[in-house]
Image (cartoon, helix red, strand yellow):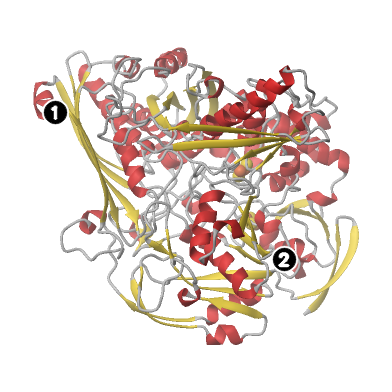
Amino acid sequence: MKTISFRLNGEARRIETWPEEPLIDVLRQTFKLKSVKAGCAPQKECGSCVALIDGVPKVTCSVRIAQVEGRAILTLEGVSDNERRLYADAFQVAAGLQCGFCTPGLVLRIKWMTDQGRQLSRAEIARALDGHLCRCTGYVKIIDAVELIQAAKQGGALPAAVEDGGVGARLRRYQGGELALGARPFVADIDVSGMLHGVVVLSKHARARVTRIDVAKALALPGVAAVATARDVPGERWVGQIYKDWPCFVAEGEEVRCVGDVVAAVAAESTRVARQAASLVEVEYEPLAPVLDPAEAIKPGAPQVNPRHENVLSVTRYARGDVEAALAQSAHVVGGVWTTQRIEHLFLEPEAALAVPLPDGRLHFYSQGQGIFEDRRQVASVLGEPEERLFFELMPNGGGFGGKEDMTIQAQTALLARMTGRPVRIELNREESILMHPKRHPLTMTYTVGCDADGRLTAAKVDMLGDSGAYASVGGKVLERAAAHACGPYRMPALAIEAVAAYTNNPPCGAMRGFGANQASFAIEGCLDLLAAKAGLDRWEMRWRNILRVGDVFTTGQVLEKSVGVEKTLLAVKSAYDAARAQGRAVGIACAIKNVGLGNGAIEYGKSRLAVHSDGTVDLHTGFTEMGQGLLTILTQCAVEVTGLPAGIFRPQVNTRYELGGGQTTGSRGSLIAGRAVIDAAEKLKADLDGGLTLADLAGRVYAGEIRIDDTTAPGELKNGKIKTHTTFGWATQVVVLGENGALQRVIAAHDVGRALNPQQCEAQIQGAVHMGLGYALTEELPCKDGRPVTFKLREIGVLRAQHMPEVEVILVEDPEPEGPFGAKGVGEIGLVPTAGAVAGALEAYDGVRRTRLPMKDSPAARAINLGRIADADRDQWH
Ligand code: FES
Ligand code: FES
């Protein structure tokens, strides 16, 4: 131990500590300065932990406490109130934050940049932000915020944020100011008196039999309160959203099935002791040959990966017409194999969970999952307790994108709290996070598609095989969606589609933004381009001749009766597309469709509750998750629109106090379903207001809202004589323009959102999705070798930084959806569905190479981005 002296936020400090202690830990744990976030520590690659040291931004996860002897440290908590207000306001005016996890670190960097007094261009700002990763925004609106701050510091006035408004208003994000300043706690920021720190022990093998688990040495370590293994689980040990095929602890005698499997969990007085104890848990394995190739996995005789299901997880088929005959009669036929890669969500906030035993015997669970009611159901099952004994509260969620739907550490945290009777918090580090949650599926897709001499599509034959990894998660549903979207937003008179999801010993794959539609889009858009070339048609024209319109039949057999906005989006990009081509630019174009809502025969509920208080505020309860997409702001706007009450009185809340469960926040359905439920409750409140009562008169009253969607059909089924696989769909057309060197220059994204409930947030969602789509196209991947990711480093995973982003122009098209709230439909996912296909088309226009494998690292656009350098030799050959 050593005494270290420094100034922190203007005050002299002197502490006794280990000299090697990372500064981030001292700031967060000793001084409780929670604006400093741990996104990737100790990788020093995300920027969320930035503090100013002697006035200069430094990532505090790379600084040892001994290095700050005699120096001055500034965190956001030490910045003056006026300046804090400037940053919070600018970020809200510009809509420069979504989940807000990256924002405090960015703000300090921006303070430093703008304090220099130099007028920076957008390109210079983007370069200066290179040390920061944002997974939500696509950086466009962050740079807008910097420009506002820059102007304000040079004497300009900051535009006022929109404080009130209903549908169509650019209302500022609910609690956006607190999030921007790091003042709204995430789960990992909450400290509770008497809290223990938990750590999980993960499998070292992708497939092995566990022959012995010995926790004696770990338990004997001073400061350790409990070590949990499978034998401590009082209830059902197997969890899962659809199939219970995933043990929250693997037991002695069983197989581990992937490298993220949990064999033990430790609770101790500090994270340091917990980690030391975890290293003392002795696990003996008998390694087995892992099943890594999905094509091999589904062959007869392959070892069964998961004891609860055969290796074929699901098969989805769609068929109509005589495909072989139609192809034989087609003027042009193209085909090939398109492959896509495994993708890591890389939400900036790693998973964290906190379980606090209450005096009445209940457990208060602080969650950042995408469905707290689902989490409660599964945790109750593991604990063997009734759900009423568990109170789940949603905390700010630092990004999800589908990756926080499955259980990771919820059950282990709750169990340790029950075993010790004390609060327990588990926070995963980045490597553990990547190991534990499911990924985007790698798919192999074999396509044969024909068209007539006029370029009109005739038939498609498609085979898809997806690697779902060791557990089902929602993998079968992903392949079901991939099959449904196999022909994109195009009329296909004859089709034969088969999509198979396979178990392997690779990391599980499940939900990720786009949910199978992205992979299919990459392939079908490639086919459209190839057919356009054969038919001698311009690519825009090829799409114009084939897009779905009202009255047409979608791949699933659903007749599209309403709100088919793809034609409008195609028209919206035409002038930009033509202009770029006229300038001799390499241009790509792709259209897209994405289902909104679960559909496929699922009964979907939306429930809400408006409770009026005597102080004039109204609690707005929903069961859906705010994860940066702006749901709570949108729901407020729906309530404002109906009631005419000011936005500021609504207080959105997400917890399990009332039975408002409606499933996971997934499938772009938050606005659609939760929005309609809020409208239902708000109309009842409005009726009382219209009856002459004031809000004061209504204090104590509660208005419940509920909607039920039960008219969709499962694949291959009819209801009331018709097929309706989905309530509605999002539609889009994107154009990608390359510069003279083949690098990304511009993206034009035209999206039919039905109705823009908050246009600024719609734009922000699409910009962020385009960023994710460009990474998917060019640089992002998470390859595995022997079932283990070959890297956990953010830069090698290949998420784009601000300086890699081209100009992104969003065009909002409004083709109202009759079943949506005020005509709106979901916009969360579709923003990246067409992007990779459009990039591939642009690249082919540039160098004549048709690329069918993602990421397209061999392209000039990828080479212009210094990211994602993973050697091919480091990966298994089939990924
Ligand atoms: S936590 Fe320090 S850079 Fe990511
Ligand atoms: S707002 Fe930047 S990571 Fe979510």
Asked which secondary structure carries label 2, the reply is loop
| Residue found 83% across the figure and 35% down from its top | 615
- Badge 2 density bin: few <14, some 14–19, many ≥20, Cα 10 Å: few
Give the mark toward the camera: 1 or 2. Answer: 2
Q: Amino acid at mark 1?
A: Val
| Residue found 66% across the figure and 55% down from its top | 187
Q: Which residue is mark 2?
A: 359
Q: Amino acid at mark 2?
A: Pro
User: Residue 335, image x and y in percent?
Assistant: 20, 33
Residue 848 visible in this rendered orientation of the protein: no
Location of residue 231 with respect to 537 vertically, above or below: below
Q: Which residue is mark 1?
A: 323
User: Residue 214, image x and y in percent?
Assistant: 48, 84
Looking at the rendering, which quadrant does residue 129 occupy?
Answer: top right
**Label at residue 338:** none
Location of residue 806 with respect to 567 vertically, above or below: below
